[in-house]
Amino acid sequence: MSGKTDRGTAYRTEPVPGGSLVMGFHVPVRRASDAAAASSPAFAPNAFIRIGADETVTLAVNKSEMGQGVFTALPMLICEELEADWRKVRVASASSMAKDYRHTNWGAQGTGGSSSVASEWDRLRGVGAVAREMLVSAAAAAFAADRSECRAENGAVIHVPTGRRLTYGRLVEKASEMEPPKDVALKQPKDFKLIGKPTRRLDTPEKTDGSALYGLDVSIPGMLTALIARSPVFGGKLKSFDAQKSKAVPGVVDVLEIPSGVAVIADGFWSARKGRDALERTWDEGEGGKLSTDALREQYAQLSRTPGTAARQDGNAAKAFAKAAKQLSAEYDVPYLAHAPMEPLNCVVDLRDESCEIWTGTQAQTGDRRSAAAILGLKPDQVKINTMYLGGGFGRRGSKTSDFVSEAAHVAKALRKPVKVIWTREDDIRGGYYRPLWHDRIEAGLDASGYPVAWKHTIVGQSILAGSRYEASMVKGGIDETSVEGAADLPYAIPNILVDLHTPILPVTTLWWRSVGHSHTAFVVESFIDELAHAAGKDPFEYRRALLGSAPRHLQVLELAAKKAGWSEALPVGRGRGIAVHKSFDSYVAQVAEVSVADGKVKVHSVVCAVDCGMTVNPDTVAAQVESGIVFGLSAALWGAITLKDGRVEQSNYKDYPILRMRDMPEVQVHIVPSREEPTGIGEPGVPPIAPAVANAVFMATGTRIRRLPIGDALRKP
């Protein structure tokens, strides 16, 4: 099928046949969520589904909704098998208290890694099928008919021979008496009625009429507001503070020291803000006060010229270089990047004698509960987190240290009153967690035909996984998988490859940022491949094609993007096209960018994108996520940079850490490759290819090669 999204982005997809899946599993009976609980009769066969006598179908979603569409895509998985009436479906955020809602791979409740649909593909279809079979059995009993004569359809069960019909609401009591089947056969894709169809999002009405509640909207009786004065440099320690002037500010209730700094508590945000501004404090800056971006870049560049820890070693690169007809090398720099979500960080904590309730937008419910419980002297099952809508996450609200939740727990423990801790945008941009700064040195040896026979890629940058719960499983032999992803799994047919890594230790706090390591490796690899193509006198698209013979899914999206972009067609004078292809989160994305450059400023006119993310649940969501990734990636590629001077972050807000505005938005086309494969990630894979596609287009338009991001700075500096 083909069509257009409401945003005007083109998409193309079609259902494909596949085999059925029979699953055997047990999901404990549990109400769908606290919000969905009601005294009226209901059918709640598992932790995810509750059907009321009023025909309302309430589905619990165990992932955080931060704009990516899981409050629609995941219910679609359940309803496909449940045969529910989509008009009667309601969504509730799943409780943080139940183990049933844990990620199928992580063992903890959380949202990230572009894994929401992929991780729930089997489980949620399965719970829907189980509930459907119980309803059909209940109807068969009511009809005094054979089970085989009944089928579920659009929120009702029909007795086929007679046409008799019972709605799900009329079956709730009888269905609750049925035993869940041990095995259920899931539909074949050719029989899908909902999956694969463009579907309007269930959360759109409340997000457009203003009734949706985000963490920042939460207010509970007796709640106070706190802002924290934190060290201006990374790793700094509080030496002393004087709260006299702060306490003199009207509305300020108290000033308390906590591990991360000094909390100024007041009856509202502005009183707390003024109180914090008036606070006198002295810091021991330590080594963090000496950090500067320029010095770090030089340190990293020197490290890149020394052997690192090997992440991939194929053949003998040193011998191949010695025999190469031509050698090329280049060095690339990318900066620290902030997440900068539209909704600033916030957390409400209500601590009682034997329990605690928290309201926040989090991507890591289980980890945040554990951290809060440890601080408060409670057991994790005494801490309840209410997951609010997230006004942007991008990884920042999945903190590996639970920093913004832990901090609020410390304030509540000291205050013993309900409190909301708010980070201003300046707080987060100047003292939050960042995508690391990276320096890459890359070399290639070419044969007489201009194709690479040797490849050496040295990466220098901080570990993202260090200090996280994933460090033990994902950092092996000194190699952080996220540092080398997209580089160590290079898809191009090169016989001799060496990828090595240096991991400096610094006080700057780092965190996964949308697309994680792929955000820098795609820029480096796809930029350098482009350089090799031009050095060989070959078309960049054809050059990639020749090297991707053993990577069919890379090749498919590459060819589709080039075709839809009219790669071989002439361009207006002053414009250039650039192409890039990259795999991340098991999805394949190719992008072609068309740009022009005037007065040192880049204008991106259009981006054509081809994506293979396996079977598509909601093509509208896929198109929206790719568009979103392009916006996010373009913001960083054109302007994004966190820089340090005397240990201090020089940026503060959107005025000096800009994001893409409507006037800068290119025309975007998204083409979805039909696939028989199971769904893979889509929230992040649109980000990595955009920076190299634009940088390569700038070269085609101007002859200037971009090796340092952001592009705006690179065009202004030698």
Image (cartoon, rainbow, N blue to C red):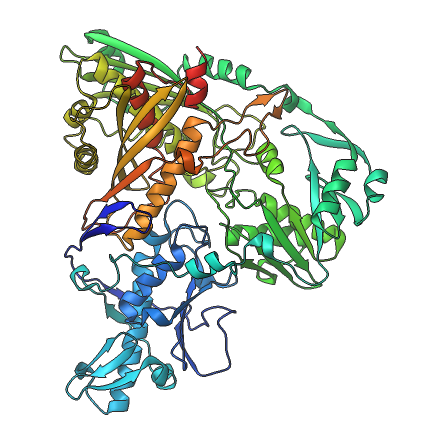
Residue 608 in sight: yes
Residue 476 in sight: no
- Residue 144: percent from the left, percent from the top? 23, 92
Relative vertical location of residue 172 with respect to residue 193 in this rendering, above or below: below
The quarter of the displayed image where residue 353 is located: bottom right
The C terminus lies in quadrant: top left
Q: How many circles with numbers are drawn on the protein?
A: 0
Q: Report the residue at 22% width, 51% height from top.
A: 3
- Residue 78: percent from the left, percent from the top? 32, 65
Q: Left of 485 or right of it: where is 230?
A: right
The quarter of the displayed image where residue 304 is located: top left
Q: Report the residue at 31% width, 67% height from top.
A: 79
Q: Residue furthest bottom?
A: 144
Relative to the observer, which residue lies in front, 398 or 693? Answer: 693
The quarter of the displayed image where residue 560 is located: top left
- Residue 520: percent from the left, percent from the top? 39, 28
Relative vertical location of residue 237 with respect to residue 459 in this rendering, above or below: below
Relative vertical location of residue 31 with respect to residue 194 in this rendering, above or below: below
Q: Report the residue at 34% width, 59% height from top.
A: 200
Q: Left of 88 or right of it: where is 23?
A: left
Q: Report the residue at 40% width, 58% height from top.
A: 71
Relative to the observer, which residue lies in front, 536 or 28? Answer: 536
- Residue 598: percent from the left, percent from the top? 38, 19
Relative to the observer, which residue lies in front, 545 or 505? Answer: 545
